[in-house]
Image (spheres, rainbow, N blue to C red):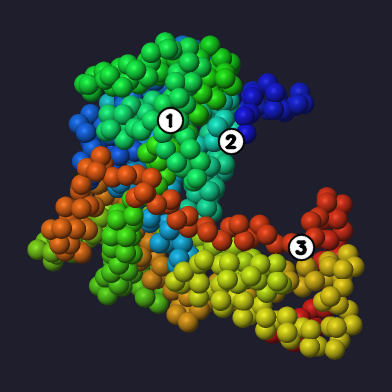
Amino acid sequence: MRARDISGVSHSFVGRLRDEIGAVRKRNQLERLEPYANIIDEVFEKYNTDDENRTMMFKLLRNPKEGTVTRRKHTENCKEIAGEIADSFDWLNSDIVRVMARHHDIGHTFLGHSGEWWLSSIKDTYGMPNFVHNAIGARNLSLRYKVQDEICAKIQETNPDISKRSLEAIKNDMWLIFDAINDHNGEKSEYSYAPDFTKKRQQYEEELMGCYTKKGFDRTLIPATAEGSLMRLTDKISYVPFDLVDIFRNNCNMPKGIINGEEYDFYEEYRKAFRDLGMADDSLDRLLACKTNEEYDDFAKEIQKIFIADVKKNTRRNNIRMSPEISNVMNRMRDINNKLMVNYTVLKEDHENYVPALEDIMKSAGRFFIRIGIIDKDNVELSDLPKFSSDEERKKLMLDSFKNDELTYGLAKYISTITPEDFAFTVESCKKSFEETIKGEIEVARAVTTGTVNAVEIKAEGEKKKRIETYIREFNDILNATYENDSMQKVMNPLSTNPIDKFKRRVWLDKASQRIKDSSVAKLKYGSEKDGIISLPEMVAMEIGSQYLASLNDYEWKRVFELSRNPSPEVKASLGRPYNTFDFRAEAQPHKAWDNISKLQAKEAEIGLTKTDASVFAMFKSFWPFKKSDEKTR
């Protein structure tokens, strides 16, 4: 995240004035919401699943020690921290930031981040939207539950004289809270958090869609309000110290260890971090001597107090800041935590058991939706599914028909709450995600075809592998036809290193890429099994199945897993064994990133363009004279 300061990032008077006007406007909007903060919180709480059955670093199914931090405990703690800091500054809305902090993790899946990664990894194989918990939360609140309507109805109950104009303004301003939830997912080592005061509602909506369709996009977002910026920082202040004490609470700490062939002295790293925070020299010894949950929690809060004091000292108007020194220590502590008991790894037996089950359930759910006719197999736009949320009779009939089938009943209950707006978002995100996914895959195929990378370097699997192999064949067909054409040989030398010839080849490859992309997008309507493309109705059906899975907590997921897989008593026992029975360095498997071809894309060795080159290239491309020959090579 770019450290953006209200008085520094805009170097012109006009730019600074624009930012200040934006800050005042956003503050006025939040002040309009402030009198109803309790109502907003009450409605959000109705849909918030951040209970004791959702996890942080330690998965509940693995029986962590009592007192280990749950998602509920984390968000309550984050709320306290954000409120305490906001109370120190009259330009921050402490009531609204408490609401943001309490509900910022409302979109988390089962098994912490692992469920999120697994679902995204599976979905990428098919070119489907990826999952990030921050976007799930903002989307569910605004589109699935439509809390803004419920909040306005409750406000009108308590204040019958309120005007329609005021209610409409409140409803329109709710996007600022949704935006804060959507933008909180940042793990970079920034120390300065300042909002994008120029952001408008349309931009937030585009960013929400971007989180589903572009991998890593959520890490680039900047909140629209200072309150959102504060909540993003307090999220880290909350979890870093408690992750630390949870490692020791669960006996997962070790003095030294080997990570990727390098030896780490974990205790010495912690001692140095504690010293740099100004803590007593015996701090690690005190942590090692903790026996009760209260002692562990008190130690975490001791560290949090140092972070909170530093934020209060360094924050300036519209710019939430830590000192670079303390921020550096906090991020170092996070890194040590991750080396010991990494939040971004999964245990092999979990991965090997749960991931195949997830994919099978998604496929089964998709077939179920199409079989019973609520998703039209030929035209997804004509599907009946979005009508169920407002048709109580049909909803009851469907639920009654599956009441004796626990697995299907849970799925049916979930889809009966999907609104037309949420369904439309699902359809649109599937279309855009497929286009975004194949764009990257086509670039990989292009690199292989031109010899930039070797095909054996591609580690894609399943449908993704089929698509890339198809694109490689199509590129070869286009290039072979081009270079066999006598007239084309005269104007485009495939071996020349002349800059103009390189420009010509790049333009030609761009045209080939676009043609292949257009062909694949056209196939999405009905699907093409041999090319690794499922139809749009199938994709939407599977996507809704994945959304259902994402809505489960740890124990709900465990029940679905058992019903669908019928695991043996031995497998159940193994999947539930305590953390202290593992050697994490031996049994943890780095998360298999779903964008495992991104490095290959970066290796494309075609000519880099300066700004001047780029403008010449754009002009050259617009006058490209070989359109007729281009048509002949199809």
* Mark 1 secondary-structure assignment: helix
Q: Earlier in the sequence, mark 3 or mark 1?
A: 1
Which is in the foreground here, disc 3 or disc 1? 1
Residue located beneath label 2 in the image = 1
The quadrant of the rendering that contains the C terminus is bottom right
Location of residue 329 in the rendering, given as x and y in whole percent from the top left corner: 51, 23
* Mark 2 secondary-structure assignment: loop
The residue lying toward the viewer, choosing from 101 and 296, is 296
Q: Residue at left 37%, top 19%?
A: 284
Location of residue 145 in the rendering, given as x and y in whole percent from the top left corner: 32, 45
Which is in the foreground here, disc 2 or disc 3? 3
Residue located beneath label 1 in the image = 266
Q: Quadrant location of residue 21?
A: top right
Circles 3 and 1: CB atoms closer than 8 Å? no
Inter-mark Cα distance, 3 to 1: 44 Å
Determine which of the numbered discs, if any, sits on residue 146 in the image.
Answer: none
In the displayed structure, does residue 208 sit left or right of residue 482?
left
Circles 2 and 3: CB atoms closer than 8 Å? no
Residue located beneath label 3 in the image = 606
Inter-mark Cα distance, 2 to 1: 28 Å
**What amino acid type should be assigned to the residue bearing mark 1?**
Phe
The quadrant of the rendering that contains the N terminus is top right
**What amino acid type should be assigned to the residue bearing mark 2?**
Met
